Image (cartoon, rainbow, N blue to C red):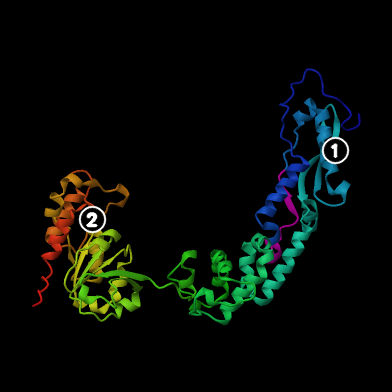
Amino acid sequence: MSQYEATSQPGTRAPQANAGWTTPAEIRAQLERHWERGAILAARVNGDALFPLALRLKRPTSAHLSARFDAVRTWVERLRAGSSERRGFGYEIEWRTLNHRVHGRNPLPQAIRVPTEADALRLLGRQREAERFEQLCAQTLAGFPELKDWIGKRPLTLLERADEWPRILAVLAHFQRHPRPGCYLRQIDLPDVDTKFIEARRALLGELLDAVLPEAAIDASVTGARRFNQRYGLREEPPLIRFRLLDPALAIQGLSDLSVPAEQFAALELPVARVFITENRINGLAFPEAVGALVIFGLGYGLERLAEVPWLRRTAVHYWGDLDTHGFAILDRCRAHLPHTRSLLMDRATLLGHRALWGQEPSAQRHRGALERLTEAEQTLYADLCDDRLGERIRLEQERIGYQWVCDSVASLTPARRSEG
């Protein structure tokens, strides 16, 4: 009896219909996954011996040959039809002869492999993309041999960015010529490259610049795309400090509410005897007048900027934050930069005097760690808030404190204005 000519024998129990034997389409899908992982192109760059490439093959068993001989025969013919044996390219089949008591000697596929990269590319229809990759790779390595490892890890990125790659290389070349340029991104003048082009590709450019620039041109202490400018020596928009002059006599050309770069604020020469700091913007706008004083507001997490203001070390400083654990943590941090800072409206009397206006501090915002720069009274109140001795997650927000209470507290700290005449 010739191979595959018999039919299934009566009385045998057939395996399930969906045997899951590997099909030509599944072979191509396996190969496609190698492409999608970048393995095929990476092997070109890294010199890896990827081919011949063995692929998984789920094949019929001897039991299938007995029970579903026709199905096995059809599967074998389909697999052979998609192979290099019939098509002249693609995958090769390794055969194994199976001796069967009924059907005799029958060759069955034992293994599948793709012999060469050329076979893989033709089977996938990726020849043009591979050629384009080769061109981009050669162009890149001619100017930046340091990028060989990066290309080996990210070959598909090179293809995905093919249309814009010459502009990306132009940016890299500019930074090589001008390491840590000290200018604004807007001032980089390259053909077809604008500020938004670089900003939209900061993560990618960061990876590439890390590879092509010397260590001295990179600030390794800062990371992430958002800090691209600082990492590679570009100027950033200067941080602004907003303040109000609380004494009309201190107004600058009639101006009392100003926002200026931190460097200019540090150079101010005003007869200011007292500085208030509050986080809440509206509190800063509504802060009562005070002789020889100003209020800084809306800093958020920018308290560190104030450490660079020399005249603040010679001025009385008061910090006003929320009466909760987080507020005391910020007060503690403020004192790390300005040790002589005193708290304002962050005392037990203020908290108990506004019981009806208490809220709850968000659990995720609470601070429970030790604070080493609080006064004894502040430390006691902070502990009470941490341990919920006054109630669960008690919080008194700055803006809930009565305005007259604020005015009286500020007035108790500042001298009254002398009347004229």
Report the side of 354 relative to 297 (left or right).
left
Nearer to the camera, 350 or 409: 409
x, y (%) of residue 118? 80, 58
* Label 2: which secondary element: helix
- Establish if 308 lies above or below 128: below
* Label 1: which secondary element: helix
Task: Determine the image quadrant of residue 213.
Answer: bottom right
- Establish if 421 lies above or below 99: below
Task: Please tell me whether residue 50 belongs to the stretch shown in magenta.
Answer: yes
- Establish if 256 lies above or below 106: below
Report the side of 363 relative to 105 (left or right).
left
Task: Determine the image quadrant of residue 321.
Answer: bottom left
x, y (%) of residue 62? 76, 31
The residue range painted magenta reads: 42-56
N-terminal label among 1 and 2? 1
Which residue does the image show at 73% across and 53% down from the upper left?
53
According to the picture, the residue beneath numbered tag 2 turns out to be 398
According to the picture, the residue beneath numbered tag 1 turns out to be 77
x, y (%) of residue 112? 76, 46
Which residue does the image show at 30% across and 81% down from the upper left?
267
Could you tell me the amino acid type at mark 2?
Gln
Mark 1 to mark 2: distance in Å?
81 Å
Task: Determine the image quadrant of residue 22.
Answer: top right
